[in-house]
Amino acid sequence: MAIVRRRGDDIPLLIGITNSSGVAINITNLAQLYVYIIYSTKGTTLVKFNKGGTDGFSALTAVTATSYRADIKSSITKTATLGTYHVELNVVETDTDYDSSQKNTIGLDVVFNLKDSISKTVSSG
């Protein structure tokens, strides 16, 4: 079940990745981590993140080596389409057995359901 968030919220999403045994993966040591927040109905991207905030991506914030945060700012959510959003991750690991020496693993999960907000229409931000 998706968490309900309101239009105009600053939405911090904590990103943690585990391997098939449930052990936390050190994100800092990954070649790259791409995070896309996608409007589920139409498949459009609301905002995208990577570790360094390069190439048109916003930067993820390192909380610990195994936990990063993607901050979806209120300036983005206050005009976002209402409905369900999900996160798509592309975990990029260095591995010479794969194309360009990079192993890509894609993951998907429901993140939040964006509902309207009356208070945000009259408050700052």
Image: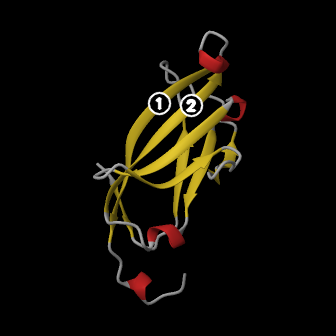
Q: Residue furthest bottom?
A: 122
Q: Quadrant of the C terminus?
A: bottom right
Measuring from the top left, give residue 33's x and y in whole percent: 61, 37
User: What amino acid does circle 1 point to?
Assistant: Ile
SS category of the residue bearing label 1: strand
- Residue visible at 47% across and 70% down in the picture: 9
Label pair 1/2, CB-CB below 8 angstroms: yes
Measuring from the top left, give residue 116's x and y in whole percent: 32, 74
Classify 3 as above or below 106: below
Q: In terms of image quadrants, where is residue 119?
A: bottom left
User: What amino acid does circle 2 point to?
Assistant: Val
For the residues marked 1 and 2, what is the alpha-carbon distance in whole angstroms? 6 Å
Classify 104 as above or below 90: above
Badge number at residue 91: 2
- Does residue 25 appear to the left or right of 82 in the view shown? right
Residue position marked by numbered label 1 in the rendering:
106
- Residue visible at 32% across and 66% down in the picture: 82
SS category of the residue bearing label 2: strand
